Image (cartoon, rainbow, N blue to C red):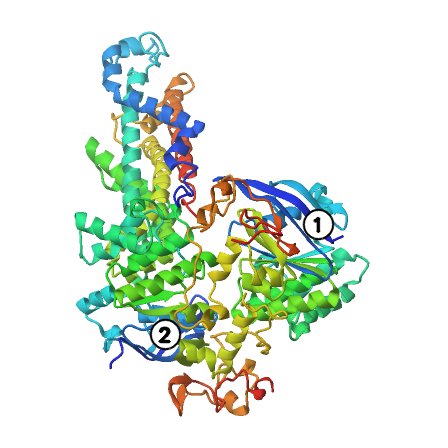
């Protein structure tokens, strides 16, 4: 027998992830939604209904109420006579982009803040820790609404960027605190002292020895931030302080559809179902990633 | 007949890394007033074997027979085992903190052990008995220490408190699993001394499990050396230490810096056993020691039986090179 | 001759605090005035029980822990006063092997990269030269160089400690500090590592500070041995001299305890060759007794011991044998003396 082979019999994290049925289902769902979003122009071409174009003649009934799902409008029309299918696909692009971008930004900022705070300690730690505490303590929605109304941004790109920034700001702290705690634990492990004893500078120790040992947690937390950010965006847009109309997003569609819900169920059902499926799949996948990475390999 | 008689014990259990074949056919016995030392390295199966006997390895699959005062522990129900564990068999573990509840004073925990065994005894009497037991275990100022929480006691005092608790029901057999591994040298000697004294005074049977041949050397009448889940060698303390037969026992003795080594002068060198101990998840056919053995033969691919050594029917070794009465050792 | 390493009255006191305001309620005297020298080429063993300060001393001499008072001098230079470049050179010259072979290796890095770390940090080698050095080092410590791509979890405890040793000697340090390097290993593997350290010392001419709680292991690798108790050195002598003629009663007790668990001692149930076993346990370094720290457990303690801490001094006729005891016997072996039990 050689010394090798210990502790590796159970296979890699990736292999464990691939064996997880729930994870496979969740990944397939997300893939379908992503394809649906990517192919938005195709839906627009097939239906002949561009995203923001209104078709009151065909989309609205005589009394002005939107028509339900039909051969012309597969998933019905909205009160302006726009195609819900096409808007849901374009909205998926916005929702997913905002969710992923905000989560990545939050992960980046949170990891940086948490790592610096945890590793440096002292006054820098106190400052960053208080900043993160403050971000967590603020009433998110209230502040977000205040910011959105204070900075009257009219451009589509501007409103999108502001939404991403607001969501990232309120998400980074939760992740940052977890990373900080994790770094504090890793910092006490003997191999960090061993690295210090070789004369390695702090920056190298952080990159080579600390970050790889918190990367798994960051990956899991980030994957769980995505659905939270999508819901946050939906909430903001629902309240009219997220992305600007006529840009579609699931939240904006839910907001616009709320009034006509009694007569037109599809206005809520379509974006609502998509939102639910996406967040559910993201959460399932995040849990599966965490389970697969599991406790550190070895003892 | 011995108080505890274990025959062909087999223990395996599942871990996320695969099935661990902890014990693969082990026989031993211990009589009242006698001490059996079980020695082995990590993964040799020494602790798993004894824990499985007492039903302390949930989910473990066991085979063989383990007669304690005539009753087979391996077929006993959980309820009966629990009664045995808190009664006629006492246990002391490596980490005394794990055996003590952190939120109760040690005296109260010992008093509870007393009452669990003898429900008729009054609270006050149980408390007095707890203090007596602490004194018996060599705890200085036992009345005051009885009121202390476990974390307020030093490592040595905790181990003494745990021994006092194990003694509460007046066990016939005391099992000490690495009782001194967490203790410093001067304290270790005190605890070993205490175990020896208690055994002699109360006529208990004692099983001491250790990775350290030296810990067992001062205490055991009979020593069982385990390797790869099996007995490599078994015999009286003196014959085994003076005339070790199995290459593993020899290797183990040659790898500790002992007084005998230094007696040879400054240049004396340890002769370590090469390589790592076997992986209990991946038992190989034949003698488990073969990959590390300097004398390995083709025949070692077959399992060597445990046979008596020349001139001493009580001294057994599992090695093809031990020929028994007429043959020479390795 | 100047010593390679000199420790002068080194103290490390950790404050004990309580409450959110971290009010200081006491001090843990982890190291309470240690003075010793390590000459180039020698192996100094340091032995003592948990809490005696031996690991704190290891961290002080490797500059991982600043001293509260006193000095640590490497080649005559105070390590606390090193310049940036001086410190970098110090880190090259002084390396450490830790107790825990599971914790001291980053589980997410391949062992080849771990061993290469000091070489990369100090830009000694790179590329193919670096890989060759790593292979040579693995070979030197008895590891298969083809396993450089494996993770620590794929190695046994002994092999991991070999990885840690390879990392520590990669820069050919002038001083190697080993902090309980074999305590976590199985007996048969301990011997492998002890022999490896002895061989490396001879091959590379290393100066070693070897720390352990186990007197026989210390004796096996050391030229001189310092016995520590409660943050102080209580006896310091050549290894053979210390074993043959211990002067401090604590050293004698450690020898007795070692003899009590010596597998070669197959006398009628060993109790340390008939020596009385020490009673009690070491006091907490947060509340050390006045006078000699050992007096509460000492069979020969007198009012003087309770009052005055004894200095670590030599006696006439044996200038290299230091002991901190008011009652050093006039001659030779304390265990043989009839007064030992009184």
Q: Secondary structure at mark 2?
A: loop
User: Residue A260, can we see it?
Assistant: no
Q: Nearer the viewer, residue C134 or A9?
A: C134
**Disc marking residue A87:** none
B80 shown above or below A190: above
Give the quadrant of residue B174.
bottom right
Q: Position of residue C6 (x, y in %)?
A: 30, 78
C265 shown above or below A71: below
Residue, disc 1: B5
The residue positioned 77% from the left and 48% from the top of the image is B70
Q: Position of residue C64 (x, y in %)?
A: 32, 66
Q: Nearer the viewer, residue B289 or C251?
A: B289
A278 shown above or below B40: above
**Letter of the chain that mark 1 sits on in the rendering:** B
Q: Residue furthest front?
A: B326
- Position of A247 compared to B76: left or right? left
Q: CA distance from mark 1 to mark 2?
A: 49 Å
A31 shown above or below B135: above
Question: Mark 2 and mark 1 in contact (Cβ < 8 Å)?
Answer: no
Q: Residues within 10 Å of mark 1 (few under 14, many from 20)?
A: some
Q: Position of residue A122 (x, y in %)?
A: 32, 62
Q: Position of residue C135 (x, y in %)?
A: 26, 50
**Letter of the chain that mark 2 sits on in the rendering:** C
Residue, disc 2: C223
Q: Secondary structure at mark 1?
A: strand
Q: Residue furthest top?
A: A71
């Amino acid at each position: 027998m050689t010394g090798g082979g210990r502790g590796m019999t159970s296979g890699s994290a990736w292999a464990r992830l691939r064996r997880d049925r729930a994870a496979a289902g969740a990944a397939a769902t997300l893939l379908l939604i992503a394809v649906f979003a990517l192919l938005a122009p195709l839906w627009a071409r097939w239906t002949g209904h561009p995203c923001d174009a209104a078709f009151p003649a065909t989309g609205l009934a005589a009394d002005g109420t939107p028509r339900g799902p039909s051969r012309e409008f597969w998933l019905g029309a909205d009160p302006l006579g726009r195609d819900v299918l096409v808007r849901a696909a374009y909205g998926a692009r916005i929702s997913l982009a905002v969710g992923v971008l905000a989560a990545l930004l939050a992960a980046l900022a949170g990891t940086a803040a948490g790592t610096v705070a945890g590793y440096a300690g002292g006054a820098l730690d106190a400052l960053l820790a208080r900043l993160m505490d403050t971000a967590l303590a603020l009433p998110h929605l209230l502040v977000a609404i205040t910011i959105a109304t204070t900075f009257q941004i009219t451009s589509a790109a501007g409103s999108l960027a502001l939404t991403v920034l607001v969501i990232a700001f309120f998400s980074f702290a939760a992740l940052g605190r977890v990373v900080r705690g994790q770094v504090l634990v890793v910092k006490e492990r003997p191999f960090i002292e061993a690295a210090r004893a070789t004369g390695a500078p702090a920056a190298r120790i952080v990159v080579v020895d600390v970050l790889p040992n918190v990367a798994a947690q960051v990956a899991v937390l980030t994957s769980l931030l995505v659905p939270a950010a999508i819901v946050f965006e939906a909430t903001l847009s629902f309240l009219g302080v997220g992305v600007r109309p006529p840009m579609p997003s699931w939240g904006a569609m839910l907001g616009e559809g709320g009034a006509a819900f009694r007569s037109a169920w599809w206005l809520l059902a379509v974006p609502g179902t998509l939102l639910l499926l996406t967040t559910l799949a993201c959460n399932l996948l995040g849990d599966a990633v965490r389970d697969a990475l599991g406790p550190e390999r070895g003892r | 007949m011995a108080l505890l008689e274990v025959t062909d014990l087999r223990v395996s259990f599942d871990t996320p890394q695969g099935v661990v074949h902890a014990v693969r056919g082990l026989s031993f016995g211990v009589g009242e007033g006698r001490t059996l030392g079980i020695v082995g390295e990590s993964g040799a199966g020494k602790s798993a074997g004894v824990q499985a006997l007492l039903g302390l390895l949930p989910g473990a699959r066991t085979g063989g027979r383990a007669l304690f005062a005539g009753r087979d522990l391996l077929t006993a129900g959980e309820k009966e085992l629990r009664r045995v564990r808190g009664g006629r068999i006492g246990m002391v573990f490596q980490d005394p903190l794990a055996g003590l509840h952190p939120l109760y004073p040690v005296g109260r925990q010992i008093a509870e052990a007393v009452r669990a065994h003898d429900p008729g005894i009054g609270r006050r009497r149980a408390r007095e008995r707890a203090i007596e037991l602490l004194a018996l275990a060599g705890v200085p100022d036992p009345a005051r220490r009885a009121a202390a929480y476990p974390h307020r006691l030093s490592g040595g005092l905790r181990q003494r408190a745990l021994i006092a608790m194990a003694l509460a029901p007046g066990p016939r057999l005391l099992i000490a699993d690495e009782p001194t591994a967490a203790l410093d040298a001067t304290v270790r000697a005190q605890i070993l001394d205490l175990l020896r004294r208690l055994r002699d005074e109360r006529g208990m049977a004692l099983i001491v499990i250790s990775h350290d041949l030296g810990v067992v050397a001062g205490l055991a009448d009979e020593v069982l050396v385990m390797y790869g889940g099996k007995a490599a060698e078994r015999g009286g303390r003196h014959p085994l230490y003076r005339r070790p037969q199995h290459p593993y026992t020899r290797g183990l003795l040659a790898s500790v810096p002992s007084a005998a080594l230094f007696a040879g002068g400054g240049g004396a060198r340890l002769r370590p056993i090469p390589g790592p101990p076997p992986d209990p998840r991946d038992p190989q056919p034949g003698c488990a020691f073969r990959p590390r053995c300097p004398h390995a033969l083709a025949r070692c691919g077959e399992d060597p039986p445990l046979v008596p050594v020349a001139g001493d029917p009580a001294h057994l070794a599992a090695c093809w090179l031990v020929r028994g009465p007429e043959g020479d050792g390795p | 001759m100047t010593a390679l390493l000199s420790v002068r009255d080194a103290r490390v006191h950790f404050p004990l605090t309580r409450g959110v305001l971290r009010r200081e309620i006491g001090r843990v005297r982890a190291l309470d005035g240690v003075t010793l020298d390590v000459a180039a080429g020698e192996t100094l063993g340091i032995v003592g029980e948990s809490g005696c300060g031996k690991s704190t001393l290891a961290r002080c001499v490797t500059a991982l822990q600043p001293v509260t008072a006193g000095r640590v001098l490497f080649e005559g230079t105070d390590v606390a006063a090193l310049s940036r470049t001086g410190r970098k050179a110090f880190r090259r010259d002084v390396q450490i092997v830790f107790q825990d072979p599971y914790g001291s290796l980053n589980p997410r890095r391949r062992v080849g990269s771990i061993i290469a770390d000091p070489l990369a940090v100090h830009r000694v080698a790179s590329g193919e030269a670096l890989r060759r050095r790593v292979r040579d080092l693995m070979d030197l410590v008895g590891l298969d160089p083809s396993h450089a791509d494996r993770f620590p979890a794929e190695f046994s405890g002994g092999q991991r400690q070999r990885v840690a040793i390879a990392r520590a000697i990669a820069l050919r340090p002038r001083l190697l500090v080993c902090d309980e390097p074999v305590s976590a290993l199985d007996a048969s593997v301990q011997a492998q590592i002890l022999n490896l350290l002895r061989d490396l010392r001879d091959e590379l001419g290393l100066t070693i500070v070897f720390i352990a709680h186990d007197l026989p292991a210390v004796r096996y690798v050391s030229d001189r041995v310092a016995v520590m108790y409660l943050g102080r050195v209580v006896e310091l002598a050549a290894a053979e001299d210390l074993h043959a003629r211990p002067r401090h009663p604590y050293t004698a007790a450690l020898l007795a305890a070692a003899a009590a668990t010596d597998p070669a001692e197959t006398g009628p149930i060993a109790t340390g060759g008939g020596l009385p076993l020490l009673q009690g346990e070491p006091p907490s370094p947060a509340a050390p007794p006045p006078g000699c720290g050992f007096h509460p457990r000492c069979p020969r303690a007198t009012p003087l011991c309770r009052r005055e801490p004894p200095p670590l001094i030599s006696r006439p006729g044996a200038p290299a044998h230091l002991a901190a005891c008011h009652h050093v016997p006039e001659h030779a072996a304390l265990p043989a003396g009839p007064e030992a039990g009184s």
